[in-house]
Image: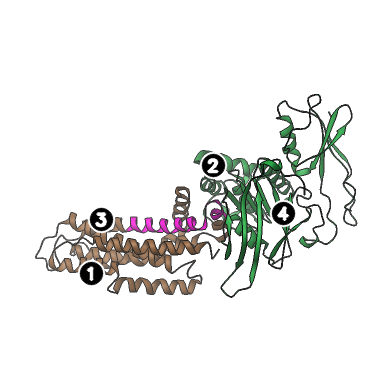
Chain colours: A brown, B green
Amino acid sequence: MTALLRYQAELLVRSHRLLPPLLLYGIFLAIGVQSGQPVLDSLGYTAAGLLPVAAWLVRVCVAGDPPAARQVAAAATSPARVHLACVLTALLCSTALGALATVVVARISGAHSADHRVAVPVGEATVGGLLAAVACALLGTAVGALCNWPLLRRPGYALLATALAALVALVQAPSPAHAAVRDLVSGSHSGAVPMPVPACAAAALLCAAATAVACALSARRA
Amino acid sequence: MRALRPPPGELRTTLALEGVGRRYGPRGPWVLRDVELAVPAGALLRIVGTNGTGKSTLLRIVAGIDRPTVGRVRGRPRTAYVPERFPVELPFTAVGYLTHLGRVHGLRGRPAAHAAARWLERFGAAGHAHTPLAELSKGTSQKVAVAQALLADPELLVLDEAWTGLDQRARAELDRAVAERVADGGAVVFVDHDPRRLAGAADAVYHVHGAGLAPRDPDGPLAADGPAGPRAAGRRVRIEAVGPPGAAPPDGLPGAPEVAGAPDGGTALTVPAAYSDALLRALLTAHPPWHIRAVTEPPAPEGPVAPAGRAPHPPKPEERP
């Protein structure tokens, strides 16, 4: 498994397909985050933007391997392991990206509530922001795992489904990503730092379930 | 059927398909149905059949890449697979990709890199070791595909027309690599459109026909697998060796040689050409070792007729002490 992860990670770093989602996320943050803005608002924005990026990264990893190379690796291990390595690589990448963005945003933002009346501790806010970012990365990975090969094989449908599912996961109430981002934004109004641990746990469960379904199907759709 | 190596008493099945069926989609036609196949260790199995009969699907199930719709696959040896085409656009050099694949096959980093360089050299692609995969010719790409499969001495090697696209020298090298795997106790399952490929060397031949799989006489004609006509017997090599006084040749020699007496107390062992190196190695490293007196290419045996317009290979002395 380590060998597969190393292979997939190097493939991701060396291929230029990593650049578009990275650039998009950078532009998204550059537009929406400015220094001195309320820290919890900015962290909520940072986490929310990560969800579609995480879903896109799954697509980059899953579709980045030509079928012949995938079959060769699957014979040496198993199709499910190869697929798991793809999804895990994407998850690790989006989590690292989210963590980096959260730390940078927390440092440049203003340590106060939205109305500038309550001071917000930066350390605590960073932890809350990291949890929200992880929840969004996990849910985005779940969306990516369900909206790409082997479940959806046509690129057009896959892209459309990924965009719609990412949007729904961000704005619809039962979604843990929505809950985590909402907690940050409402925390910015009150000045209390939320710790979206339940949202994180729920997102981890959803991500594990989605990945398990995708991996189980990967041998049937070879 | 020729005797398998190791001797029949020690035969071990590495992989077995039991009642395997495969179709794509719940209403699709059955590509394979009720397939029973046992792959013994140390056996070379050939799959024949006309195009589009499910040979590739069968090989993918044997390789563990595809799962049967019904039935089951028992056993999962360390497996390597070579697809028919390997046009991969990956951002690695040949040796970089092979080192990664060596690790995926279970080697450590340094042995993986050494094995990558060694196999590229064997197939005459050492000069392309540091060429990006995307810039390789079709033939060199195929050499990389073949090398990745042989890196870690797999217990089961699955070759889907792996010879296609290779040059003459690399094809012969792959023949020998296959014989080495079999001589070392690995199993090899292959499909090739050329009926002369490893002719006479296969331990069993199976015919895919009408979604079913039926055993064939391995020494019979392979007309359904390529150009019509009787199968050429395949090149054979005759090794004349002298063992310790009164000793019979060791058991389980590579290529299941035909043994005959030779003048001056020698023994003549005849094997398919791909096995000649493996047989020589086995004889020279036997305890006590055998002395090699001559290696020759005998005329094609009686019976099978060479294709019209082609003269059988004349006996060609390759080595005379």
Residue B41 in the image: state x and y as whole percent.
Answer: 65, 46
The image's mark for residue A22 is: none
Name which residue type carries label 1.
Answer: Arg
A124 or A71: which is nearer to us?
Answer: A71
Name which residue type carries label 2.
Answer: Ala
A34 or B193: which is nearer to us?
Answer: B193
B119 displayed left or right of A9: right
Name which residue type carries label 3.
Answer: Val
The image's mark for residue B46 is: 4
Specify start and end residues of the magenta stretch as a single range.
A72-97
Residue assigned mark 3? A103
Residue A24 in the image: state x and y as whole percent.
Answer: 36, 65
- Does mark 4 fall on the same chain as mark 2? yes
Nearer to us of marks 4 and 3 is 4
B42 displayed left or right of A150: right
Circles 4 and 3 in contact, beta carbons < 8 Å: no
Q: Secondary structure at mark 4?
A: strand
Residue B137 in the image: state x and y as whole percent.
Answer: 64, 55
Circles 2 and 1 in contact, beta carbons < 8 Å: no
Label 1 chain ID? A
Mark yes or no: residue B20 visible.
yes
Residue at the spot 87% in from the left edge and 52% down from the top edge: B304
Name which residue type carries label 4.
Answer: Arg
The image's mark for residue B112 is: 2
The image's mark for residue A182 is: 1
Label 2 chain ID? B
